[in-house]
Image (spheres, rainbow, N blue to C red):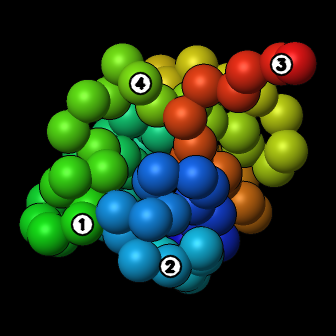
Amino acid sequence: MAIEILYFAWVREAIGQGSERVDPPADVTTVAELVDWLALRGGGYATAFEQRERLRAAVDQAFVPLDTAIAGAREIALFPPVTGG
């Protein structure tokens, strides 16, 4: 199942791209597992995801906790906490 992953702010800067299409293995079933799988790519991915507590996610444009299932998701966004002003 291919999913469009969107990266924002320092996550995008560390990885070096704003989006990509990935096809995670079947045992990757939550946002947290997806983050772990992406971090295994090393380099900028490992850097971007080393402090998971600083990471927020949205699945199909709805904010979700990292333990949310990704089955059927078309788009997942990963970004730092959003601040208002």
Q: Earlier in the sequence, mark 3 or mark 4?
A: 4
- In depth, the one of 56 and 22 nearer the eye is 56
Q: Which residue is at a point 44% across and 65% down the rendered structure image?
A: 13
Q: Which residue is at a point 48% across and 39% down the rendered structure image?
A: 31
Q: Which mark is residue 84?
A: 3
The residue tagged 2 is 17
Q: Position of residue 75 (x, y in %)?
A: 72, 60
Q: Residue furthest front?
A: 85
Q: Is 22 situated left or right of 74 in this image?
A: left
Q: Which residue is at a point 38% across and 34% down the rendered structure image?
A: 32
Q: Earlier in the sequence, mark 2 or mark 4?
A: 2
Find the distance from the CA under tag 1 to the CA under tag 2.
10 Å
Disc 4 on helix, strand or loop?
helix
Disc 2 on helix, strand or loop?
loop
The residue tagged 4 is 54
> Mark 3 belongs to which amino acid?
Gly
Q: Earlier in the sequence, mark 4 or mark 1?
A: 1
State which quarter of the image contains the N terminus: bottom right
Q: Which mark is residue 44?
A: 1
In contact (CB < 8 Å): disc 1 and disc 2: no
Find the distance from the CA under tag 2 to the CA under tag 4.
19 Å
Find the distance from the CA under tag 3 to the CA under tag 4.
16 Å
Q: Earlier in the sequence, mark 1 or mark 3?
A: 1
9 lies above or below 83: below
Do we see residue 39 in this rendering? no
> Mark 2 belongs to which amino acid?
Gln
Q: Position of residue 58 (x, y in %)?
A: 70, 39
